[in-house]
Amino acid sequence: MIRVLVVDDSALVRKILTEELNKQPDIEVVGTAVDPFVARDKIVRLKPDVLTLDLEMPRMDGLSFLSKLMKHYPMPVVVVSSLTPKNSENALMALSLGAVEVVCKPGSAYSTQNISMQIVKAVRAASVARFDKKPVMAAPVASSNGASLPNTAARLRHTTNKLIAIGASTGGTRAIETVLTQLPPNLPGIVMVQHMPPVFTTSFANRLNQICRLEVREAKDRELVEPGVALLAPGNYHMVVEKSGASYYVRLKQGPPVHYQRPSVDVLFDSVAEAAGINALGVIMTGMGADGARGMLAMRDKGSHTIAQDEATSVVFGMPKEAINLGAAVEIAPLGGIAQSIIKAASQMATA
């Protein structure tokens, strides 16, 4: 059984979370707390496996509590937050402090059933998340003259018929940040799916854009996939890639969830396989479940180079494991080496 402590100052939210989690045969809510001070005592006494945490609480805010918790008593935490721009910024900060997942607070978005599935999935993912290892970061690739790629990569600046597709879930915000901050701006266009609620993806894209050499933004419908630009699928929308002449553009669609997710990595990868095939590169990283595995297999079957994150550096070795088991991954790499693998594969695509 996964033992959960629910921390929220709202009696209604505590009731809803407790009821929804207790419906699952493998999850038990062992206690609730109205604020971090009560939570602190119950963590010591009840020893839960996973904590759900609100960020806006009396006496001590959730971020301050999370920071202290990770320093003195590290454990898997799922942030439950309402959908506002301020809360999305705080949720990203919580993820950087060590929270495993962020989900919508009941009443924020989606149907109650969908929120229930997201919370259950997040708690299960958190229960198996790795806290014992931190990924080894690879040094940024640079030559003595400051160039970030071999000379052949100069051709990538004007390439419009190549693209890179990336998918991730649990632990993916830090994984994507690790990879994108090591990439140079002279790469084919990038399309990305990270399982996150709406509004949160806007804040995530804005944060990445501030710290990356690439331009990063939340995708808009019919937007071109351009070299040096990374487009992140907005929360609650599937993103697909379509081809027009030698160029690619994205479409945003409200289809049914796939693997309980919208956006879905499988939906993106399937479209990339059809639109780009051998001209594409696919990357699947840390995450719970199997979303993206079959889509990556479709990409490999069409000739794409594909990379899966290894087990040792994955927060949750679910999605990459499924892709590897299906034979979808051409290459398996640690998180710290994925950026260099992308650079190498992109250079080879440019000369093909």
Image (cartoon, grey):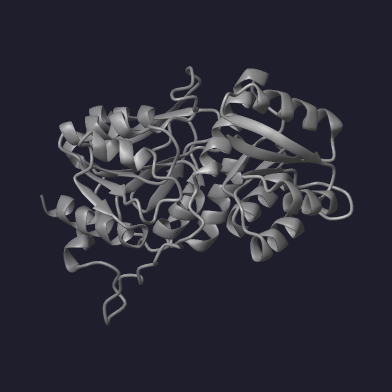
* Residue 300 appears in view: yes
Q: Residue at x 17, y 50 (%)?
A: 349
- In the rendered image, residue 115, in percent from the top left (x then y), is placed at 63, 26
Which residue extends farthest left?
Answer: 352
Q: Depth check: 108 or 121 in front?
A: 121
Where the N terminus falls, by quadrant? top right
Q: Residue at x 48, y 21 (%)?
A: 257
Q: Residue at x 31, y 77 (%)?
A: 146
- In the rendered image, residue 278, in percent from the top left (x then y), is placed at 16, 38
Which residue extends farthest front?
Answer: 45
The image quadrant of residue 18 is: top right
Q: Depth check: 113 or 217 in front?
A: 113
- In the rendered image, residue 258, in percent from the top left (x then y), is placed at 44, 23
Q: Residue at x 84, y 49 (%)?
A: 38
Q: Depth check: 138 or 3 in front?
A: 3
- In the rendered image, residue 328, in percent from the top left (x then y), is placed at 22, 37
